[in-house]
Image (cartoon, rainbow, N blue to C red):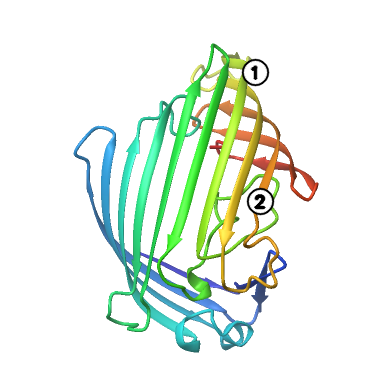
Amino acid sequence: MSYSRNHEANYNITNNVIDYYRTDTAYVRKELQANVGYEIRPKLYNKHIFQAEYTSVQVADSVILLNKDYLSEVKNNMQFITLYYTFKRDTRNFKSYPTTGYYFDFNLVKDGVGVLDEKLNSLYTTSQIRKYWQLSDRFYFSGLIKSKISIKNNPYYFYNSIGFTNDFIRGYELYVINGEHSILTKTQLRYALVKEKIFKINSIPANKFNKIPLAIYLGTYFDSGYVDSKINSKNNSLMNSALYGGGVSIDFVSYYDAVLRLEYSINKFNETGLYVHFIAPI
């Protein structure tokens, strides 16, 4: 169960950037969520997950005035039930920074089941596969394909395509591209400049803490994606357009699954940037 109150809420996307409404005198968004789930693991690498979740969300009237499609039926509050089914297969050697194996998942999500908010009736699927190859002693290659298909158009509250969480095209970190359907691909070639090596810090007396493992990888990458949307596409040029970007990177991988990634990227508009990330690229 979780409960959150925020003085700020994103209510729309204009020119491929999120619009925010904020006030320090009141909470503009309140959300309560409670869920229950059941997990089945019939095989070592396979997992089936079933979940049911209750959500109650309320926003300030100002948010609805700014975007009448934020919630269903031009209301400032909504309650609904969401049903989830997820299948996962994971053979990666390391979860935080894999170099061999593969990962696959399929998700089926149903928002609205005919109770509470009867007007809400949404269904969408997402699926992804990530594959990792060791090409030689020091060279590694990885690739990702991820897709989302929505069966029915939803209010703005339910949209999160490319640019949200970790689903972004490198070179477009400053943008979001929202829509009903999307596809994202990523590829990366890495070279182990420093294979895992133990560095000892003599100034730390405790043996448990004075040894730090570190691996360093140099990389080059290319990403692409496409978002299909019939909603608000006039004000967002990145929707319904083929997008791609690439660049070079250096990754630092240490103990406790710590990852530091520095990337220099360029996108299709020749915009460049230096970005810092704290998770594996794929």
Q: Secondary structure at mark 2?
A: strand
Q: Mark 1: which amino acid?
A: Ser
Gap in angstroms between the C-alphas marked 1 and 2? 49 Å
Residue 83 quadrant:
bottom left
Residue at x 28% of width, y 74% of height = 113
Residue at x 50% of width, y 31% of height = 97
Residue 85 on image: x %, y %: 29, 56
Residue 258 quadrant:
top right
Seen as rendered, the residue at the extreme top is 137
Residue 48 on image: x %, y %: 26, 47
Residue 181 on image: x %, y %: 50, 61
Above or below residue 237? Residue 275 is above
**Is 227 on the left-hand or right-hand side of 34?**
right
Quadrant of the rendering where the N terminus is positioned: bottom left
Residue at x 68% of width, y 73% of height = 234
Above or below residue 90? Residue 14 is below
Q: Secondary structure at mark 1?
A: loop
**Is 99 on the left-hand or right-hand side of 82?**
right
Q: Which residue is mark 1?
A: 203
Residue 211 quadrant:
top right
Q: Which residue is mark 2?
A: 243
Nearer to me, 98 or 120: 120
